[in-house]
Image: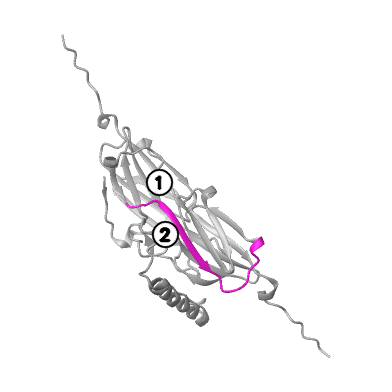
Amino acid sequence: MTNWNVLNEMEDLRREINGIFNSVFANGRLPRRTTAFLPGYSTRSYPLVNLYEDANNYFIEALAPGINPEKLELSITGNILTLSGEKERIQDEVKPASYLRSERAAGRFTRSVEVSGEFDSAKVEAHYRNGVILVVLPKTEKVKPKKIEVKVS
Amino acid sequence: MTEKNVPTTTCCNTAVASEAGTRVQERCVTPPVDIYEKENDLVVVADVPGADKDSLDIAVEEGVLTIQAAAKHTAPGERVYREFEPVNYYRQFQLSDKVDIDKISAALNNGVLTVTLPKAEAAKPKKVEVKIS
């Protein structure tokens, strides 16, 4: 429990409530099911993301195995980062009848993540390793913590 | 090929230190798999994002294929929002006698593990031409 932080818990709650409102009341329509291609995950967002922060950067970690990194797209609007791409199908030519088990799924996905602070969109970097996307968003000077030296007079 | 259920106590015997310190992380997830049959092989494809080559452990013992892997944290810094936790992957399958155990091979690519199980000679399709005289 060393990392437990009331503010983090509140931030999580805020995001979850926002998520419910956005999904239920967006444009006064029914919730959008953007990820129907994932069995068992159909009502969830894909890919799942984690958000981290240190003094200089924000980090977004997304769980997305089996993506062609060339087809992975990142776009930034304001403080919203959008990840989109395609989870590829098995390349082998397989007859549908030869499948003994099919739990993985494939298809296109889009996920938007809101970052609570300002970041420099020109310096955003993304890495893809072992099926995990890591996006590094450098903070702008405004939101970086500043050290103020205390002068002894 | 059938999935084998294992008692949870044997699950994840790879000790992974948790964030808090030396506590052994006991939670593990079942990776989703596709299994399909080709003319000469049986192919198991599993999603194991976050696992690397070193943490991956694939073994066949007494006709049971075990896939084990540990995912690690890639991002530094303090957690702000979390939807998933890197945990261990664990899944077992009972193999039939028709798999040539010595020739099993595996490849890991972009978090997708592909295990190829070649069929034993006896299980391969054979075509016998019958001559008509």
**Which one is closest to the eye, mark 1 or mark 2?**
1
> Is residue A13 visible from the viewing direction of this image?
yes
Instruction: In the displayed orientation, state which residue is furthest to the bottom.
Output: A153
Q: Determine the residue positioned at 64% across, 64% down.
A: A121
> Residue B110, relative to residue A144: is it above or below?
above
Q: Position of residue A65 (x, y in %)?
A: 45, 53
Residue placed under numbered mark 1 in the picture: A89
Q: In the depicted view, which residue is nearer to us: B9 or A114?
A: A114
Q: Residue A96 at what x, y percent from top left? A: 29, 42
The way the protein has been coloured in the rendering is: one colour
Q: Secondary structure at mark 1?
A: loop
Q: Is residue B38 above or below residue B25?
A: above
**Kind of residue indicated by mark 1:** Arg
Q: Label 2: how many residues lie within 10 Å, few (<14), some (14-19) or many (20+)?
A: many
Residue A147, placed above or below residue B60 = below
**Front one among A3 and A60:** A60
Residue that carries the numbered disc 2 in the rendered image: B88
- In the rendered image, residue B94 lying in the magenta stretch gets the answer no
State which region is magenta. A103-122
